[in-house]
Amino acid sequence: MHRREKDILVHELGEVARASGAGLTRLMAKAMRTNVHEVAIVLPLAADEAHRHVAAILHDEGRVLDGAPEHAPPGSTVLRAVVDAGKGGLNSAVVTIALTPGGDTETHTLVRAAALEGLIKQRAGEHTATRLATALAP
């Protein structure tokens, strides 16, 4: 199943709001802007090792999602997760990591993070993509 980042973020915010009784949150979340950032890195690992490494990091950082994103790069393996983002981890970010084999000993990796932005710009997508790209570096 293909799920858009914005749909996942709206759902996540709605679940948090439902627990606190805020009924209009999903409607408001649909109107919010999305902060998206991508970081490209090369992992000095074969594709299988890179996949295990990235999966372990995403599992530690948040909740791994099933289903491919709406636009997966051709020839890539894609992993996704929802992780805590923003000040104090009070926001959620959808992280999509595309792994493309670059030979026997390296894997080209694109780390993409998207987070909803309210009135106060936290650039949570940008900070999350950078943080995870740094965490992935062996």
Image (tube, helix red, strand yellow):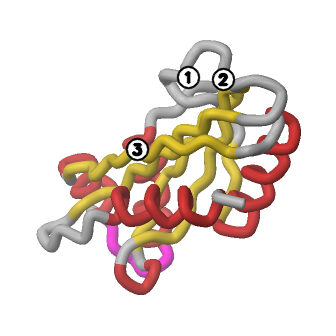
Residue 134 screen position, x and y as percent: 55, 63
Residue at position x 83%, y 27% in the image:
104
Q: Is mark 1 on a helix, strand or loop?
A: loop
Magenta segment: 19-23
Q: Is residue 22 left or right of residue 133?
A: left
Q: Residue 68: tell me if it is visible.
A: yes
Is the C-beta separation of discs 1 and 2 under 8 Å? Answer: yes
Residue 99 forms part of the magenta stretch:
no
Above or below for 50 versus 77: below
Where does label 3 land, which residue?
38
Residue type, mark 3 in image: Glu
Where does label 2 land, which residue?
76
- From the viewer's side, name the closer residue of 18 and 62: 62
- From the viewer's side, name the closer residue of 23 and 121: 121
- From the viewer's side, name the closer residue of 50 and 69: 50
Instruction: Check the image and name the residue furthest to the left.
Output: 119
Viewport quadrant of the N terminus: top right
